[in-house]
Amino acid sequence: MKASLTGIRKIYRNSRISRKLFLAFSIMIAVPAIAISFLFIGIKQNQLYKDAMTTGSGHVARLNEQLRSKMAMIENVSSTALTQKAFVDFIHSNMRGDGLRLVKFRQNQFEQMHNIIQSNEMISELSFYVDNPNVYEIWPEIYHYDKFWPQDFWVTLREEGGSAYRLFALKDGEHTLSYYRLVRLPGQQQKRPSIMEIRVEHGAFFSDLLAEGGGDFFSVVMDGTNPSRYVYNQKHSFAQNAGDELDTILGRVHQQLDVLQQKSPVKITEGDQTYYAIYRYIAPLNAYVVDIASHQALMKGPRSWYVWVVAIAACVLLLMLLLVSHTTRRIFRRLDRVLISMRKVRQGQLDAKINTGLGENENGDEIDEVAVSYNNMLDEIKRLMTQVVDKQLIAKNAQLHSLHSQINSHFLYNALESIRMLAEVQKQPAIAEALVSLGSLLRYSMKWRSDTVALGEELANIQSYIQFINFMESADFTLTAELPPEVLRYAIPKMCMQPIVENAVRHAAPKGGGVPIQISVKVENESQLIVEIRDDGTGVDPQTLAGLQAALRGDADTPIVASKNGLGLENVHKRLQLHYGKDCGLWIDSVQGAFTSVTIRLPWENTNLGGW
C-alpha cells in the first residue's frame, strides 16, 4: 500500500501542470456533480418504483373489480334462469311422453330460457345436465347427466355451497370459463343431482385484460392450484420479449403468490432480469390477477438518464480539458518570459528585467507579482554588489594605508622620540608632553591589528588628540566621558569617534579658544549601543544642519566620496550602515549658539560588531 502511494505521488509530481489542474477540477467539479446526479437518479428510481407499484396495484384492483362485476352478471343470469320453474320442472319430467307438450315447451319455456341466454352477449352457452332417462337432447341447453364430466363433481359443488367457478371449464375448457350450480337434488338416492353450467369464452370474460397489448405491466390470470394454467394476451410486448422464458417466469411468480401477503409485491430474478409482480386473489375463481413488470422496463427512463449524465460529464470534462490547456498555455507563455530573463541573468545580464506592462496602480495576478518580485530581486542584487565593491575598496584602501604606515612608522617614532628627549634636556615639559600625545596619536592610527578596538582605547586616543590640539593651538578644550566601566571593554569600529571630535574641535570653538566636549554611552532597548558626543560650541546654522541631516537620511548605497575636510560625518555614517545595516549610523542635532550633538548607533550584541 505504501509503495503504491509513493508511486502515485511520483507520477503526480512528474505530471504536467495542465494535467494536475485538470485532475483538480475533475475532483472538485465533475466527480461531485456525477455523484450528486447519480444520487438524484437513485432517488428518482425509488420514487419511480413506488409510483409504478402504486399504478400496478391500482390496475390490478380495477381488473379485480371488473372480473367480479362480470361474475356478478353470470350469477344474475343463473339466478334468472332458475326462476324459470316451469322449464326446470319440464326437463325433469318425461319429455318423450307427449309430443304436443314438447312443442308447447319449445315455444314457451324454452324460448324464454333462450332469450335469457341471448340477452347477455358474454355468455356463450347455458346447459342443464339432468339425471333423467326421459330427457330429450334435441337442444344444446338440455343434456343427460351422463354427458357431464366428471360424474362426481356434484359432491364438490355441494361442499362449496352449491355453486363454483372454474377458470378452465371441466370439459373442453382450454379457452372457456365455466360457472357450475346445483339445480335440484335428487329425490331418490340412486339418482344424481341436476347441474347448470354457464360457459363464457375467455375472450369475453377477460376482454379488458386481453385487449392490453403494451405498457410496462403484463396482466395475467393464474389458476390458484395449477401453476401451468393461466390466461394472458399472447400478443403483449412482454410475452413476445420473454419468449420461451415466459413459462419459467410465470412459474416462479406463481410459487411466491400468497393469499395472506397479496399487498406486498413479489420480486424474482430470472437470468439477468429482475421482475416485480403485484397481485390480487379472487376467491370465487380460485385464481390470481397478476401484473408483472420488468425492472429494466420500469427504470428505462432513469437508465437513459445515467447515459445522459455520463455523456454530459464526458463533454464537461472535455471542455474543462480544453479550457485548462488553453489557460495553461497562456500562463506558460508569460512564465517563459521569466525563464528567458533568468537565462540572461545567468549569463551576467543583471539588467534583463521582465516587462510586466502594468500601470502605476495595477497589481496584476500572481505571475505579475512574481515578475515584480523578480525585478526587485535584480535591483537588490545590484545594490548588494555595489555594497560588496565598496567594502572591497575600503578594505583595499585600509591595506594600502597600513602598508604605507608600516613603511614610515619607525622613522616617525624615532624622530619624535629624539625631539622629545631634546625638549626634556632643554627643560621644555609642555613640548615633551605634546610630543608624547602626538606619538600616541600616530601609533593608534598607524597600527591596525584588527578593524575593531575597545571603547576604552578609542577614548584614550581622543584624549591624546585633545591634549595635542590644546598645545598646538593654545586652546582650552576639555573632554569628559560618562559611561559604565563594563562598556570600556566593548569592541567598536576603530576611528569611528575621532572624526566627530575633530569636527567639534574645528567648527565648535572660536580660534584659540575651547569648548567642553562630553561623551556619554548607554544601551537602548537592549538592542543598540548609543554613543553621544556633545559640545557646547557655536552650533550649526539651520541651512547647513538641514543639509547634513538630509545627507544622513539619504541612500547609503551611493558611492562613498571623501569630503573637503577628510573623512567627514557623511562618510562615517555610510560606512557604518554598509557594515551594520540601516538601523545603525550617525545622527546630528544642533541649535546655533548653544550646542551640537552627534549620536552613533551600533549593534548592542558585541558579536555583531565588525570593522570597516
Image: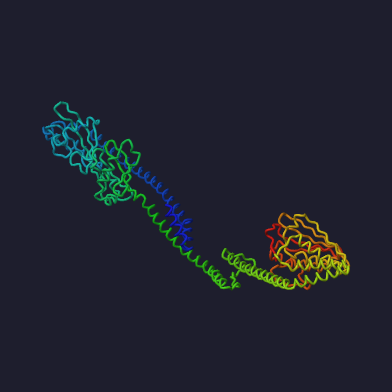
Q: Nearer the viewer, residue 341 or 282?
A: 341
Residue at left 43%, top 61%? 315
| In the depicted structure, whether residue 466 falls above or below residue 206 | below
Position of 398 compared to 594: left or right? left
Residue at left 77%, top 57%? 521
Q: Nearer the viewer, residue 260 or 185?
A: 260
Q: Nearer the viewer, residue 184 or 205?
A: 205
Q: Position of residue 213 (x, y in %)?
A: 29, 50
Furthest-front residue in this view: 425
Q: Quadrant of residue 222?
A: top left
Q: Quadrant of the C terminus?
A: bottom right
| In the depicted structure, whether residue 209 falls above or below residue 131 | below
Q: Quadrant of residue 103?
A: top left
Q: Quadrant of residue 153?
A: top left
Q: Position of residue 111 (x, y in %)?
A: 20, 38
Q: Position of residue 273 (x, y in %)?
A: 31, 49
Name the colour scheme. rainbow
Can the viewer see residue 503 in this picture?
Answer: no
